[in-house]
């Protein structure tokens, strides 16, 4: 099974900061990676698919990059609405494994 | 508007069974693969199961293989998850999620809570 490892687990940042979250796959998944944002008590929301494609309606301050085994999610200028938990997910196989999550907190 | 609405959650004793349902509307249900994803209290997301649009392809996480069964009824726009031999560690909010054309999970339900406890 493909394992996904995110870092860091928690990130403290201020409004306006540039934030980067890393996700590593245990084997190559080409570009079959998605990023989600989840707020407490809510379902996850798709931000990025195919590693770097922005889902419709998602602000352009979110971007994704990478291929193979290393991927990043970048928020160019953190906004108050962005404090949440972020998950990467591989879908190279139909298993759809998620990373353990990165909580972005207010500094 | 795409909507996914889960139901069927509740309290069940260890070893018991429960059947979850997901009612879909606002899109051509028979054209999309569907998934179940769960989240234990205070924990991360765990993919549980996938079923293709025509039910030809089905996958399960190792943690539920042999105990859970995913199915769908395209005539009723409905997705189901039959959960047997439930364990304490199956306690979670269960979400149904659509696999979009880009393969990301683009729509999610609000979730239904399953609590396994004696």
Image (cartoon, coloured by chain):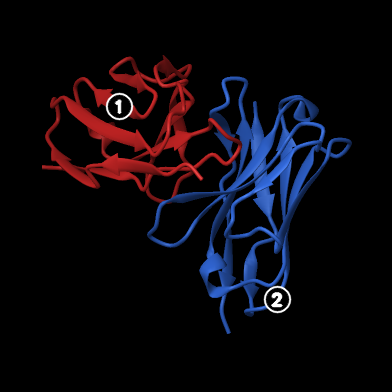
Chain colours: A red, B blue
Name the residue: 80% across, 38% down: B55
Determine if residue B51 is in view: yes
Name the residue: 70% across, 32% down: B33
Quarter location, residue B88: bottom right
| Element at label 2 | loop
Q: Chain of mark 2?
A: B
State the residue position of label 1.
Answer: A73
**Against A21, is B38 above or below?**
below
Quarter location, residue A85: top left
Position of the N terminus of chain B by quadrant: top right
Position of the C terminus of chain B by quadrant: bottom right
Which residue reaches farthest bottom? Answer: B118
State the residue position of label 2.
Answer: B16
**Against B17, is A106 above or below?**
above
Residue B108 is left or right of residue B40, and the answer is right
Percent x, y for residue A86? 34, 38
Determine if residue A84 is in view: no
Quarter location, residue A67: top left
Percent x, y for residue B26? 71, 27
């Amino acid at each position: 099974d493909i394992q996904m490892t995110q870092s860091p687990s928690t990130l403290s940042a201020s409004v306006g900061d540039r934030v980067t979250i890393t996700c590593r796959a245990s084997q190559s998944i080409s570009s079959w990676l998605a990023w989600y944002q989840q707020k407490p008590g809510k379902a996850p929301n798709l931000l990025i698919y195919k590693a770097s494609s922005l889902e419709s309606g998602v602000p352009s301050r979110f971007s994704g990059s990478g291929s193979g085994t290393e991927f990043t999610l970048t928020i160019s200028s953190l906004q108050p609405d962005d404090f949440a938990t972020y998950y990467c997910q591989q879908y190279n196989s139909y298993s759809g494994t998620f990373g353990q999550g990165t909580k972005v907190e207010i500094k | 508007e795409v909507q996914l609405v889960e139901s069927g959650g509740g309290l069940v004793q260890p070893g018991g069974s429960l059947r979850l349902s997901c009612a879909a509307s606002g899109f051509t249900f028979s054209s999309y693969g569907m998934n179940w994803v769960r989240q234990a209290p205070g924990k991360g997301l765990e993919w549980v199961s996938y079923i293709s649009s025509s039910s030809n392809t089905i996958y399960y996480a190792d943690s539920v293989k042999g105990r859970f069964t995913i199915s769908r009824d395209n005539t009723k726009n409905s997705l189901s998850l039959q959960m047997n031999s439930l364990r304490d560690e199956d306690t979670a909010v269960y979400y149904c999620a659509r696999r979009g054309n880009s393969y990301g999970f683009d729509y999610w339900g609000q979730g239904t809570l399953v609590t396994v406890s004696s």
